[in-house]
Each structure stands twice: as C-alpha cells, then as structure tokens.
C-alpha cells in the first residue's frame, strides 16, 4: 500500500471523519458513492432491483420486536471500521428530555427487546439513570452494546459489570478476533488486553458462564475487506481460543458484516477495495436473508430522537418514510405502514447467512 | 483485448466459463463446491490446502481467492504462511529428489 494511504489510515485511528473534515462525514456524499457508476452503469444491480426479482420490493416492516436507541456518538475508541464515525471528539449526546420521550415509548411498546448503543453508551452522563428507569418497564431482553474497554477507561466505569448485573442487562460486546494483532489493528493499540480484562471482570460477576442467566454475547466484525465466515464455526474457534488462553466464557458470537458506509467506506476506498467488496456482497446476496433483515422488526432512534429503519440508515441520515419521524410523536400503527428506505449498503445485511445486530438471520 | 495475461477482475468472471459449455462448467462447479464442504477434513483445513496448492501451481487468482477465504475463516497469517511453506517444501523437494536421478546417471556414465 502507498505510504500516503497508510498515513491516512493511521490518522483515522485517532479522529473521527467529522473531526478531520473528511468528505465522507457527509451522508449525501456516501449515498452518492453507493449510487455511483458501479451500479448506475449496470455493472451491478441496484438493491431495489435485486429484491424485486423475488417480489420483495418494497421492503415492508413486520411486527416491531426491537427498539434500538443510540444514546450518543461519543466513544473512548476510534475503530477503523466504525459505521457511526464515533470517537472522543463526537459531541452528539442524547439529553434526559429525549430519554424521557424514549421511556414513554419503551413503557408502551410491544417490542420485546430494548437495545442501547452508541458510541460508548456508558459515556452518556444520564446512562445509568436511563438504564434504571428502562429496566423498570419489564422489557424481556435489555441489551447494552459495550465496547468493553470503557470499563477500564476510568475508575468511574470499573463497577459497570456490577451495575449491569443489578439491572439484568444483556451485555453484547465487540471482539474482532481472539488474537491481539487483529484486534488492535482494527480498534487501536491496547484494546485487546483491555477487552480481555473486561471480559474477565464480567465473568467474575457471573456474566457469560455456561448456565448463567446473565447473558454475555460477543460481536465479531471482519477486520478488513472480507465477509464473515460461518457464525457457528467462528463461535467455536473463539470459544476454544478465549477459554484456553484467558479462561474466558461467553454465550454466543454474532458475526456481523461490515456495511460500506462511514469509516469502513473510507477504508474501502483508500485501500482500493471498494469495488471488490461490493462485488463480494452482491455475489453473496441471499433472498432468504431479505425475509428476516433487521429493519423489518427494528426501529432505530438517534441521540436527538429521530426515527430510522436501522442504525445504518441513521448514519446515512435517511429518516423513516412516515408521517411519524420523531420519538415524541411515536406511533406503532402509523410506523408499521411505512416502506423501508433502502440503498446499496443494504447488500451488507443480505450477504450469505445475512447480518443484523443480533448476528445472522438466514 | 487486455494487454496483460492476468487481470484481477477476471476472477469475478470465473463463473462465466459455464456459458460456453454449460454441462462441463456446471459439473466442474458442482464438484468444486462439494470438495470444499465440511467432510473428514474441515472446510478450514481444506482452505489451507487450497492456499498451499495455489502457490505451488502459481495461480494468482487462486492466491487472491484463498487468502481472502482464509481471512474470512479467521485463519491467521502464521497459519497461512506455514501452509505456503509446506507447499514450497514439497515443490523444492520434488526438484531435489531428481538429484538422485542425476547421481544415478552420473555414476552409470562414469568409469
């Protein structure tokens, strides 16, 4: 790779695209690339035309099962593949007022899963208050997506495992590989050791143990321009290695495909992998995955209360195509009649066994 | 026509060989797919064998394909390089073992 590209990628490890004034921080620019010549010239089919082949266009929501709330883009890490473009320099943080509006919806929704994400959700100053209030709503599965290293980033976060346990939170954590080199390359130097320590802390309070009700799942994202392998095989390899090397237990591994947006898109273009990657996604297209793609059972809420079909559409600033666009006006019935907004990034969720925030779908 | 014998983009077109001989092409891809399924050997082990052979037969398309396949399977670079050395050792051994033929011939022709 050329030196300048390496320098760019190294720089990427320190600041968000937004802080670097990178043009890909702009959602419109990303959509322009996703609608660009590779598809416009007919070399590859538009996602819309692909799903139309099997009568799946327009994509419509089914019963709402998951309410995913992004409580802010601030994060202690700056991962190369981050689709949120999160980092310490991001100031978008959900206010308590918006959280109150979310709680109102959480109390009344039929969704069985509440999924808090970020950034590092724990960095929101009202995070603990929000978790305490939300846990009273009696949601069946209450997920917090934790990057693990936050538990060691500052003393005030050291008791997070106990806090999660107290509120019966289901912890879902990123872990790109069971070896140090790959993890640190994607997520930053030192991330692997801290993640291992945090997983051990979670195990100590009972998370992830074979018969424990305290759920601890890991998320695997490929650290590069390739697709994830079979989820069960990866889970087997992760379990074997983490147990043998660090005596770590966890429940399930979710294999998630990196979508070609934000910092991962920037990486694909800078490393001259964009075209090949899009080909890989389209070649691996699986209509069975379209049937259960996560936007059909999820609503994503941004830090400022806007509603989206998924977290990826949130980052592309594609608000739901409905009269109801904000959490303050939330209405299950009205939202259930919308068409889901799609573009070429959607191929990321329909490749192979499919991909969602809960892992494979087909 | 391309002015190079190898174009990385041609790998994506591999499936098109079926267009000029559907029966043989389809039989080949069915066989190929079956070979790499889980069996007495795991798909992971077969991927490493394919990577080693790709180097021995010096097929740039196969090297690209099985490096990516290995990454997807979580195979480490250390494992990949060991596989390449296994292939290289057999290939160099295959050259060197002919040295015995050379020795035999030398001895036969010498007084």
Image (tube, coloured by chain):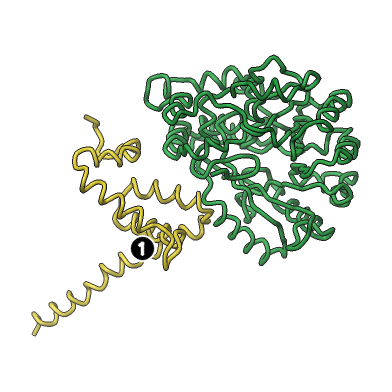
Chain colours: A green, B yellow
Query: Where, by quadrant of the figure, is residue B110 drawn?
Result: bottom left
* Residue A72 position within the rendered picture, expressed as x and y whole percent measured from the top left: 78, 30
Please tell me whether residue B92 is drawn above or below residue A201 in the rendered image.
below
Q: Residue at x 75, y 51 (%)?
A: A194
Q: Residue at x 49, y 40 (%)?
A: A288
Residue A115 horizontal side relative to residue B42, left or right: right
How many marks on residues? 1
Q: Nearer the viewer, residue A110 or A280?
A: A110
Read off the chain for label 1: B
Give the residue pinned by disc 1.
Answer: B87
Residue B109 horizontal side relative to residue A64, left or right: left
* Residue B79 position within the rendered picture, expressed as x and y whole percent measured from the top left: 49, 60
Please tell me whether residue A317 is drawn above or below residue B85 in the rendered image.
above
* Residue A193 position within the rendered picture, expressed as x and y whole percent measured from the top left: 73, 54
Residue B17 horizontal side relative to residue A348, left or right: left
Q: Residue at x 55, y 31 (%)?
A: A260
Query: Where, by quadrant of the figure, is residue B100 drawn?
Result: bottom left
- Find numbered disc 1 in the image and state the secondary structure of the residue it sits on: helix
User: Dot 1: within a 10 Å radius of its alpha carbon, few (fewer than 14), some, or many (20 or more) residues?
Assistant: many
């Amino acid at each position: 790779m050329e030196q300048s590209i390496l320098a760019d990628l190294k720089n990427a490890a320190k600041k968000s695209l937004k802080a670097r004034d990178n043009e890909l921080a702009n959602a419109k620019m990303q959509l322009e690339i996703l609608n660009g010549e590779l598809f416009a010239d007919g070399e590859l089919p538009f996602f819309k035309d692909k799903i139309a082949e099997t009568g799946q266009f327009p994509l419509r929501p089914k019963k709402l099962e998951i309410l995913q709330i992004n409580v802010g883009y601030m994060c202690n890490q700056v991962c190369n593949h981050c689709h949120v473009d999160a980092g310490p320099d991001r100031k978008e943080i959900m206010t308590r007022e918006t959280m109150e509006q979310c709680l109102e919806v959480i109390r009344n929704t039929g969704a069985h899963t509440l999924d808090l994400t970020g950034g590092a959700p724990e960095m929101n100053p009202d995070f603990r208050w929000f978790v305490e209030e939300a846990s009273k709503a009696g949601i069946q599965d209450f997920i917090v997506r934790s990057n693990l290293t936050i538990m060691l980033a500052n003393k005030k976060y050291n008791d997070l495992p106990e806090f999660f346990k107290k509120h019966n939170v289901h912890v879902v954590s990123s872990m790109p590989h069971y070896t140090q080199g790959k993890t640190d390359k994607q997520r930053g130097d030192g991330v692997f050791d801290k993640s291992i320590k945090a997983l051990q802390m979670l195990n100590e309070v009972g998370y992830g143990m074979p018969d424990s009700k305290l759920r601890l799942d890991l998320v695997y994202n490929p650290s590069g321009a390739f697709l994830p392998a079979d989820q069960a095989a990866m889970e087997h390899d992760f379990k074997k290695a983490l147990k043998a090397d660090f005596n770590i237990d966890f429940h399930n591994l979710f294999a998630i495909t990196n979508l070609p947006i934000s910092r991962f898109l920037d990486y694909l273009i800078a490393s001259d992998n964009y075209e090949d990657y899009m080909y890989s996604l389209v070649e691996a297209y699986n209509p069975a995955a379209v049937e259960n793609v996560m936007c059909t059972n999820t609503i994503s809420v941004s830090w400022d209360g806007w509603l989206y079909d998924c977290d990826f559409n949130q980052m592309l600033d594609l608000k739901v195509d409905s009269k109801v666009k904000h959490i303050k006006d939330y209405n299950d019935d009205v939202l259930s009649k919308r068409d889901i907004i799609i573009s070429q990034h959607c191929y990321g969720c329909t490749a192979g066994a499919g991909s969602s925030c809960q892992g494979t779908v087909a | 026509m391309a002015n190079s014998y190898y174009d990385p983009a041609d790998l994506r077109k591999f499936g098109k060989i079926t267009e000029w001989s559907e029966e043989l092409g389809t039989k080949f891809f069915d066989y190929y797919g079956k070979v790499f399924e889980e069996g007495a050997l795991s798909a992971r082990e077969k991927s490493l064998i394919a990577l080693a052979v790709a180097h021995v037969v010096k097929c740039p398309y196969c090297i690209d394909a099985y490096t990516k396949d290995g990454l997807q399977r979580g195979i480490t670079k250390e494992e990949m390089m060991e596989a390449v050395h296994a292939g290289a050792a057999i290939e160099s051994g295959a050259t060197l073992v002919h040295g015995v033929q050379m020795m035999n011939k030398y001895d036969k022709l010498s007084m």
